[in-house]
């Protein structure tokens, strides 16, 4: 069991979801993959498939259209999973928080485990946020080993109804 | 079954995933170095697989799971048959069965990405299987047997000397079989966002781990096939295997992905021409 919990921290696969960002944060997220920062040193891979991912990195504000997509992606990820909200928009809605179409930060829709502030945050800050999320991932992993799953309420009732 | 055979089977079943995982780790490290990065630790593939085994089980349908395990079983069997120095044609058929189960598993899910990936994987199989058969026929023409034990017992010079072009053909087939760039069209090897993950899209958690372990067996099997080309001396055998795999990693890093429309005709024409040139050479030598 300890082998699995060590491996969880050493091999976090990351999926990046752009929830209506201005692309500033997206560029900084992708900068982490370049040879300068090279997050693959920590075993982090940027995967394109929520079913393979452990960490959901979300940039940008959530609006009424894409909150379904965000929820759907979150639900498709197998446990244990953590969410990192990136940038001023991702954490709170930023300058767009009062706009009529904006729901707000990512935490209005799905539970967020780490917040990275900044507009746009530096790649170092993003890596730091992911590392904080890794600590939470280890804790959640222990819960999953005991058979406790954190799910959105609707998902839980849908699974029970099946 | 004598003791040597039992040891060979045990080694094939238990040591090859260790070797395959290590090769995958070295592959990732070398790839990172070629791209000017530091790269993950050598043991990274093991961490990945252990993590996958600790994840929640998400199942699309039961066929998918059955196919994942059959893919693993077929790949273990190819390595075991190779270790037992069995018949090359038999090994080839077991290999084909494994490939087909991977495709069926992907087709069992309704996701368009997995469906497209499965169709592309079928085209990749269509491309590399004739090439591998051509190589095996060449080995037969040269040594007079398809059975590896007989080849090792009766043929006393490296196969590479008389079958150099067929080794190139095998190298071509290996790139397609290992789904490395430029032929990573059924699952995206480097660009993880293209086609999501092709045939592996719908596998997650422990079942993706099973597929990953099968892939390690596959790698060991492929390296074993390369080793057959210099069976007379263990040192030269390992040099050949290491050089071939490094070549594969190099090609993987310096080429961009191609479409199947390029892959199929070029692999077939190139492979056929080189194979027949080599056959003529063998024929001329015998005369």
Image: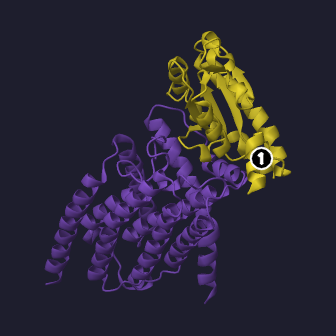
> What residue is shown with label 1?
A156
> Taking the image as drawn, is residue A44 in sight?
no
Q: Residue at x 64, y 75 (%)?
A: B10
- The colour of chain B is purple
In which quarter of the view is residue B257 placed? top left
Q: Is residue B39 left or right of residue B250?
A: right
Q: How is the image coloured?
A: by chain
Confirm whether residue A147 shows in the render.
Answer: yes
Task: Identify the image quadrant of the C terminus of chain A.
Answer: bottom right
Q: Residues within 10 Å of mark 1 (few under 14, many from 20)?
A: few
- Is residue A79 or residue B2 the one in the foreground? A79
Tag count: 1
Outermost residue toward the right in this view: A146
Which residue is drawn at the image coordinates 34% and 60% (left, top)?
A: B171
Q: Quadrant of residue B163?
A: bottom left
Name, please, the residue furthest toward the front: A100
Q: Position of residue B63 (x, y in %)?
A: 59, 68
Chain for disc number 1: A
Q: Secondary structure at mark 1?
A: helix
Nearer to me, B226 or B126: B126
Q: Position of residue A23 (x, y in %)?
A: 50, 20
Where residue B20 appears, as percent x and y from the top left, is 56, 59
State the residue at coordinates (38%, 51%).
B185
Who's the residue at 50% across and 27% down the image?
Answer: A34
Q: Is residue B287 above or below residue A145?
A: below
> Looking at the colours in the rendered structure, which chain would you say is drawn in yellow?
A
Camera-side residue: B146 or B120? B120
Location of residue B32 with respect to B154 vertically, above or below? above
Q: Is residue B277 shown above or below A113?
A: below
Q: Position of residue A95 (x, y in %)?
A: 61, 9
């Amino acid at each position: 069991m300890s082998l699995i919990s060590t491996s969880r921290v050493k091999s976090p696969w990351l999926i990046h979801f752009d929830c209506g960002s201005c692309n500033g944060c997206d560029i900084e997220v992708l900068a982490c993959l370049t040879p300068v920062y090279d997050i693959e040193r920590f075993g982090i891979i940027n995967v394109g498939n929520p079913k393979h991912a452990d960490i959901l990195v979300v940039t940008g504000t959530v609006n009424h259209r894409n909150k379904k997509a965000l929820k759907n992606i979150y639900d498709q990820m197998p446990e244990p999973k953590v969410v990192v909200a990136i940038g001023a928009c991702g954490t709170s809605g930023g300058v767009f928080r009062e706009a009529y179409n904006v729901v707000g930060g990512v935490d209005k829709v799905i539970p967020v485990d780490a917040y990275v502030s900044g507009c746009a945050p530096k790649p170092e800050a993003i890596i730091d946020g992911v590392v904080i999320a890794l600590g939470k991932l280890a804790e959640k992993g222990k819960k999953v080993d005991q058979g406790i799953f954190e799910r959105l309420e609707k998902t839980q009732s849908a699974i029970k109804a099946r | 079954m004598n003791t040597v055979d039992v040891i060979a089977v045990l080694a094939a079943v238990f040591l090859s995933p260790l070797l395959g995982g290590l090769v995958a780790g070295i592959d990732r490290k070398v790839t990172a170095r070629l791209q000017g990065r530091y790269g993950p630790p050598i043991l990274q593939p093991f961490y990945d697989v252990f993590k996958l085994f600790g994840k929640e089980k998400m199942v699309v349908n039961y066929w998918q799971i059955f196919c994942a395990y059959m893919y693993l079983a077929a790949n273990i069997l190819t390595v075991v048959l190779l270790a037992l120095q069995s018949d090359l044609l038999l090994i080839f058929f077991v290999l084909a069965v494994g490939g087909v189960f991977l495709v069926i598993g992907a087709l069992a899910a309704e996701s368009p990405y997995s469906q497209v990936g499965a169709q592309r994987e079928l085209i990749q199989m269509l491309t590399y299987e004739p090439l591998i058969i051509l190589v095996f026929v060449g080995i037969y023409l040269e040594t007079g047997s398809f059975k590896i034990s007989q080849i090792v017992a009766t043929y006393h010079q490296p196969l590479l000397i008389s079958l150099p072009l067929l080794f190139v053909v095998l190298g071509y087939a290996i790139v397609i079989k290992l789904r490395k760039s430029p032929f990573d069209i059924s699952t995206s090897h480097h660009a993880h966002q293209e086609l999501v993950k092709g045939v592996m899209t719908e596998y997650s958690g422990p079942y993706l781990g099973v597929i990953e372990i099968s892939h390690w067996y596959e790698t060991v099997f492929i390296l074993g096939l390369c080793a057959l080309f210099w069976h007379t001396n263990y040192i030269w055998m390992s040099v050949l295997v290491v050089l071939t795999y490094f070549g594969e990693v190099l090609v993987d890093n310096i080429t961009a992905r191609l479409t199947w429309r390029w892959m199929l005709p070029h692999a077939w024409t190139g492979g056929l021409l080189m194979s027949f040139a080599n056959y003529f050479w063998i024929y001329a030598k015998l005369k």
